[in-house]
Image (tube, helix red, strand yellow):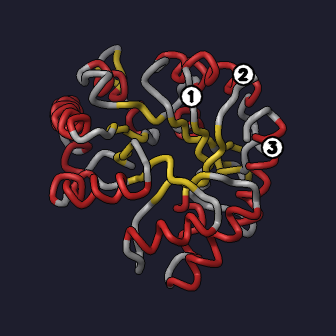
Amino acid sequence: MAKGTIAAQLYTVRDSMSTPEEIASSLKKVAKAGYRAVEMAGLGPLTAQQWKDLLDKNGLTVCASHTGMDRLQSDFDAVVAEHELWGAKQVNIPSMPAQYREGGEQGFLNFAAAADDLGAKLRAAGLRLGYHNHSFEFVRFGKKTGLQLLLENTDPANLMSQIDTYWVQHGGGDPMAWIRLVKGRMPILHVKDMVIADGGQVYAEVGEGNLNWPAIMEASSFAGVEYFVVEQDRCRRDPFESLAMSWANLHALGLD
């Protein structure tokens, strides 16, 4: 049985994070659902210190953030300072910028080079860089996918993988195989489920869809995952209810 900490990606409840009052209320609801950690997704109307104060008040820590590559490159020192303040060790690029995606195979290689350089710079500052995949990285260039090119052309010390279980499945990959593939290179995993509704693939709360969670937990234990970050891009019920359902189902699998 896997062991680790369940975290909430705050993007899940983004529609309730527009004002300081909404943020305070939302963090209280996240903590009430059982979460002890979050992954940040933007600062909104608060300063980094104001975020820390509210997080501390609700007993929440920050395991990482999703920070766009543009901001990482243009506002590097501020990003580092924020993570030091929060006690977070990892900065995750949420998606590959369009200029690289549109460049085909060479675009992936160019992104790998840029990410490797940025990861080395973050490592020198005491942080880790990670990359969160969607399904477009499963485009094939000959016998290799774009995600393979990215991982094979970066130093594992400079770029962590943040596998997303839904998006791997969406791209035709095997979540368990990919989790095992990045053993030692993925302290933080993104978890969300998939179900078929109205003839298409849609997001589901963890344990409420068709993914094989016992097998995912086994692979995660093998790979050394420390944080299991619940992210549901779109919810078919109240997002806080969705977060609570995912937490309960992950907790039943041995996580806390």
- Residue 111 at least partly seen: no
Position in image of residue 247 (x %, y %)? 75, 49
- Asked whether, in this view, residue 58 is left or right of residue 238, the answer is left
Position in image of residue 29 (x %, y %)? 71, 69
Q: Mark 2 and mark 1 in contact (Cβ < 8 Å)?
A: no
Dot 1 or dot 2, earlier in sequence: 2
Q: How far apart are marks 3 and 1 (CA)?
A: 17 Å
Looking at the picture, which amino acid does disc 1 mark? Val
The residue positioned 55% from the left and 65% from the top of the image is 55
In front: mark 3 or mark 2? 3
- Residue 164 at least partly seen: yes
Q: Distance between the residues labelled 3 and 2?
A: 14 Å
Position in image of residue 137 (x %, y %)? 38, 35
The residue positioned 61% from the left and 49% from the top of the image is 7
Q: Disc count in the image?
A: 3
The residue positioned 22% from the left and 45% from the top of the image is 102
- For residue 58, what is the image quadrant? bottom right
- Asked whether, in this view, residue 150 is left or right of residue 234, the answer is left
Position in image of residue 157 (x %, y %)? 30, 24
Element type at mark 3: helix
Residue 225: numbered disc: 1
- For residue 103, what is the image quadrant? top left
- For residue 89, what is the image quadrant? top left
Foreground residue, 37 or 112?
37
Residue at the disc numbered 3: 249
- Badge 2: how crowded within 10 Å, few (<14), some, or many (20+)? some
Residue at the disc numbered 2: 215
